[in-house]
Amino acid sequence: NDANAAALGEVEYGLGDEMQTFFYILVNACLGGALVIDGRLHKGASGLGGEIGWVPLAIDDGSAETRPIGDMFSLIILEDLLARSGFAIEKPADLLALDVRGKAIVSEWLGRFAVKLAEAVINVGMIVDPDGVVIGGRLPARLIDELLLYVHDEIIKRGVVAPSLHRAAGSADAVARGAAAMPLAHAMELPSAESAQRVRMPLTNALKRLPA
């Protein structure tokens, strides 16, 4: 998936030179994640390792109800929020061209996102203890930096120890870089190469589940 590809791109062309074990959070149309341990993707027993978008967190409405963080925060959700406020966003770069009111809406949304993301980052730190957490995706770099600042402030406010936070070196191009890195990893026999990538057929399992 896109998050795994982005993480591979970071391994080969980004912060992978400095961090062997890290958690990658991809802020795209959907919220995704990937875990890299000792320079290799760790996808778990069922292939769902790193799927941070499905992590359930409490809803801020006073109830005990929870929702996956990916259902609360993603680029699609932000674009929908802006559309309901009268701002049409055709591509992520349009977020940087908003007027003062539009930018205030984005900053408020990033602040709310940061509260939930800080909780997820703290949990990742306690379970995996990575060298760092990397955030990338189609969200413009300046807004990723703003999000990182809010997440850092929220972690400090809670007074807990958490992994260091970093913007992905590739950021917006991370998925494309990762996809390009896969065949190169095999050709150059890099540690990140996975034999399954040579024969993987994404539709195979889905087709097997269809009725005869």
Image (tube, helix red, strand yellow):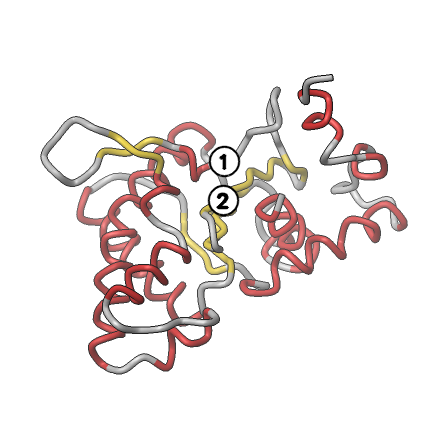
Number of numbered discs on residues? 2
Helix, strand or loop at mark 1? loop
Marks 2 and 1 sit apart, C-alpha to C-alpha, by: 6 Å
Question: Residue 2 at x, y = what percent?
Answer: 60, 48
**Quadrant housing residue 201:** top right
Image quadrant in which the N terminus is located = top right
Q: Which residue is label 1 attached to? A: 51
Question: Residue 144 at x, y = what percent?
Answer: 40, 63
Q: Which residue is label 2 attached to? A: 32
Extreme residue toward the top, this view: 212
In front: 161, or 155? 155
The answer to whether 101 appears left or right of 8 in the picture is left
Question: Residue 109 at x, y = what percent?
Answer: 26, 59
Question: Residue 8 at x, y = what percent?
Answer: 66, 48
Sequence order check, earlier mark of 2 and 1: 2
Extreme residue toward the right, this view: 187
Checking the image for residue 28, the label placed there is none
Residue found at x 55% / y 65%? 172
Helix, strand or loop at mark 2? strand
Residue found at x 69% / y 59%? 177
